[in-house]
Image (tube, rainbow, N blue to C red):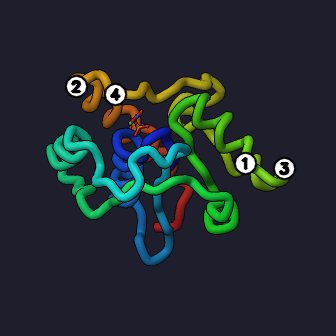
Amino acid sequence: MVCLGNICRSPLAEGILQSKVNPALVKVDSAGTSGYHHGELPDSRSIATGLSHNIDIRQQRSRKFSIRDFDTFDKIFVMDKSNYNNVIALARNDQDKNKVMLILNQSHPNKNLEVPDPYYDDNGFEAVYQMLDQACNQIAKTLPK
Ligand code: 4NP
């Protein structure tokens, strides 16, 4: 799960998907294309939104997306087109590029919808949660139970 800061959207996406998969069989992680918030906890509004749905993301710490992530992960879900372009720019080959997908295309195929950045919108977090929950339901269906 990848966004810009790895403090608002992708930490929620990580926590939501983690709650829907078998942790012994699926590795879920998140990162940001920027290192602006390296080492920080998720944004307090993401933490609160997660907790209101029984998703606890307080063990997460922000980190920057790394080229090594292309080797570690089979699928890389990005929140918006800017994240997509930033991750694709790091891809070494078509195999890397083919791993990168806009996450909302899982719930809304081929629409290329974006998860809006809620950083400057206190009221945007619940909507982000609902979008991610829908998308993660679809993703979880494709993963081992
Ligand atoms: P995120 O939100 O990409 O969903 O984690 C943001 C968090 C911080 C900043 C931008 C977006 N920032 O510019 O500091």
Q: Secondary structure at mark 4?
A: loop
Residues at circles 2 and 4 in contact by the CB criterion of under 8 Å: yes
Dot 2 corresponds to which residue? 122
Marks 3/4 in contact by CB < 8 Å: the verdict is: no
Q: Reading the chain from its start, which is encountered first: label 3 or label 2?
A: 3
Task: Using the numbered discs, state the Cα–Cα distance from disc 2 to disc 4 in whole angstroms.
Answer: 7 Å
Q: Secondary structure at mark 2?
A: helix
Give the residue type that dot 1 points to.
Leu
Q: Nearer the viewer, mark 3 or mark 4?
A: 4
* Residue in the picture at 33% in, 29% down: 119
The residues tagged by marks 3 and 2 sit, at their Cα atoms, a distance apart of 38 Å
Q: Calculate the distance from the C-alpha at mark 1 to the C-alpha at mark 2.
A: 32 Å
Which SS class for mark 1? loop
Question: Which residue corresponds to mark 4?
Answer: 118
Q: Which residue is labeled 1 in the image?
A: 90
Residue 137 appears anywhere in the view: no
Residue 138, relative to residue 17: is it above or below?
above
Q: Earlier in the sequence, mark 1 or mark 2?
A: 1
Q: Quadrant of residue 102?
A: top right
